[in-house]
Amino acid sequence: MTVNGSGFDEDLVEFTSASDQAEIALYKLGGGTLGASYQGRWAWRYRDVPTGRTTSGDDLWTGTPKTHREAAEILSNVITAATDA
């Protein structure tokens, strides 16, 4: 995954999710509609709320169709697994 910014365009954000632990913003590259499912490449930004650390990229791939919420859950799981390793 890309770290700190290459490929993420804040103006294109289609979905955001926030908790006391993380803030996620993402969009389907090529455009998407909330509620619809897409496969392929997504751009994302992840902010760890307790530390303030932000990472972003345009390299989240889904091989089967996912909604924006499902793609955000995948991103959260991948980052959590990477930081727990």
Image (cartoon, grey):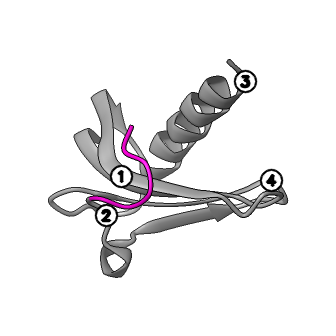
Residue holding disc 4: 21
Residue holding disc 3: 84
Amino acid type, residue under disc 1 in the picture = Gly
| Residue shown at the point (31%, 72%) measured from the top left | 9
Give whichever of discs 2 and 3 has the lower sequence position: 2
| Residue shown at the point (59%, 35%) measured from the top left | 79
Q: Looking at the image, which is closer to me, 61 or 64?
A: 61
User: Is the Cβ of the residue at disc 1 closer than 8 Å to that at disc 3?
Assistant: no
User: Is the Cβ of the residue at disc 1 closer than 8 Å to that at disc 4?
Assistant: no
Question: CA separation, marks 2 and 1?
Answer: 20 Å
User: Is the Cβ of the residue at disc 3 closer than 8 Å to that at disc 4?
Assistant: no
Residue holding disc 1: 57
Give whichever of discs 1 and 4 has the lower sequence position: 4
Q: Residues within 10 Å of mark 3 (few under 14, many from 20)?
A: few
For label 2, the SS is loop
Amino acid type, residue under disc 2 in the picture = Thr
For label 4, the SS is loop
Say which of marks 2 and 3 sits in front: 3
Give the main secondary structure of the magenta stretch.
Answer: loop
Say which of marks 4 and 2 sits in front: 4
Amino acid type, residue under disc 4 in the picture = Gln
User: Is the Cβ of the residue at disc 2 closer than 8 Å to that at disc 3?
Assistant: no
- Compared to residue 42, the image places residue 8 above or below, namely below
Question: CA separation, marks 2 and 3?
Answer: 32 Å
Question: CA separation, marks 1 and 3?
Answer: 20 Å
| Magenta residue span | 1-6
Q: In which quarter of the image is residue 39?
A: top left
Residue 65 in the figure: left or right of residue 48: left
Residue placed furthest toward the top: 85
Residue holding disc 2: 33
